């Protein structure tokens, strides 16, 4: 738990030496992937401990920027999250709809709820992980809530959701989420097998806007988006439109 203090010191150095040129700061990029890939022997606890420390480090860095630098440097600060768009496999199935929301809770809500709406984790995460999820103190919640000037997201694809089964024993964050994802057979694929679903990015941004951005009062930035295709020659790679 020393990490947040070290990160605060690092962030202060960055703000001091680069803040005259950098006007959009991201404390972390894709915290989901930073925490979920760990040694299998620790996969039920370590991701949640890392996630807690990462969020506190984010909050402390934002606090430093806002109290010591933002008024003079006139920049903005936030965090870059990542998620597919999740759509229920059967829109008329309450279970499939709940699975989509549950997937969003884990991929985005883990970070976005504390920062943008409640200061705390989504209820389904607390129910699923129980005592394995480090609780926020009142001071933590105050530090985190409102600690971003925008919502930034990396997104590449869309998945259909169904509620999965809960393994016994639980071995990972994915088990706690227990959402099964699939693709519509009619969807085209990228070279590496990703789903090409043009309407997915629209629906994801609408979902983010409605749930975390107060219907347009907070900017939403798409910080990564793209698709992989086979480009075997330089000429094809250059003329890839």
Image (cartoon, rainbow, N blue to C red):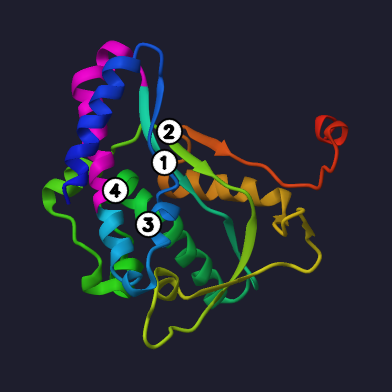
Compared across the picture, whether 223 is left or right of 54 comes to right
Q: Quadrant of residue 192?
A: bottom right
Q: Main secondary structure of the magenta part?
A: helix
In contact (CB < 8 Å): disc 1 and disc 2: yes
| Residue beneath the point at 43% across and 76% down | 175
Q: Secondary structure at mark 1?
A: loop
Could you tell which of marks 3 and 2 lies nearer the N-terminus? 3
As drawn, which residue projects farthest toward the bottom?
Answer: 168
Judging depth in this view, the residue of 27 and 231 nearest the camera is 231
| Residue beneath the point at 54% across and 44% down | 154
Give the residue pinned by disc 1.
214
151 part of magenta stretch: no
Compared across the picture, whether 115 is left or right of 2 comes to right
Magenta segment boundaries in residue numbering? 53-75
Could you tell which of marks 4 and 3 lies nearer the N-terminus? 3
Q: Quadrant of residue 90?
A: bottom right
Give the residue pinned by disc 4.
54
Could you tell which of marks 2 and 4 lies nearer the N-terminus? 4
Could you tell which of marks 3 and 1 lies nearer the N-terminus? 3
> Which numbered disc, 3 or 2, marks the residue closer to the eye?
3
Residue 217's disc number: 2
Residue 108's disc number: none
Give the residue pinned by disc 3.
35
Could you tell which of marks 4 and 1 lies nearer the N-terminus? 4
* Label 3 – label 1 distance at C-alpha: 28 Å
């Amino acid at each position: 738990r020393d990490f947040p203090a070290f990160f605060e010191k690092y962030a202060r150095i960055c703000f001091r030496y680069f803040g005259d040129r950098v006007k959009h700061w991201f404390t972390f990029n894709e915290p989901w992937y930073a925490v979920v890939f760990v040694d299998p022997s620790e996969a039920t606890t370590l991701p949640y401990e890392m996630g807690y420390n990462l969020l506190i480090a984010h909050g402390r860095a934002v606090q430093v920027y806002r109290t010591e630098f933002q008024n003079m440097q006139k920049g903005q600060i936030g965090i870059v999250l990542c998620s597919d768009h999740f759509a229920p496999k059967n829109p008329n199935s309450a279970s499939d709809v709940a699975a989509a929301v549950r997937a969003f809770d884990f991929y985005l809500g883990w970070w976005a709820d504390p920062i943008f709406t409640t200061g705390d984790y989504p209820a389904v995460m607390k129910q699923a992980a129980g005592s394995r999820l480090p609780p926020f103190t009142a001071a933590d919640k105050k530090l985190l809530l409102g600690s971003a000037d925008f919502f930034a997201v990396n997104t590449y694809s869309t998945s259909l959701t169904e509620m999965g089964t809960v393994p016994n024993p639980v071995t990972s964050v994915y088990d706690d989420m227990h959402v099964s994802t699939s693709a519509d057979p009619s969807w085209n694929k990228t070279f590496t097998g990703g789903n090409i679903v043009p309407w997915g990015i629209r629906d994801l941004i609408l979902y983010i806007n409605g749930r975390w951005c107060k219907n347009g009062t907070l900017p939403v930035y798409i910080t990564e988006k793209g698709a992989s295709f086979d480009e075997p020659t330089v000429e094809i790679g250059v003329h890839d439109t």
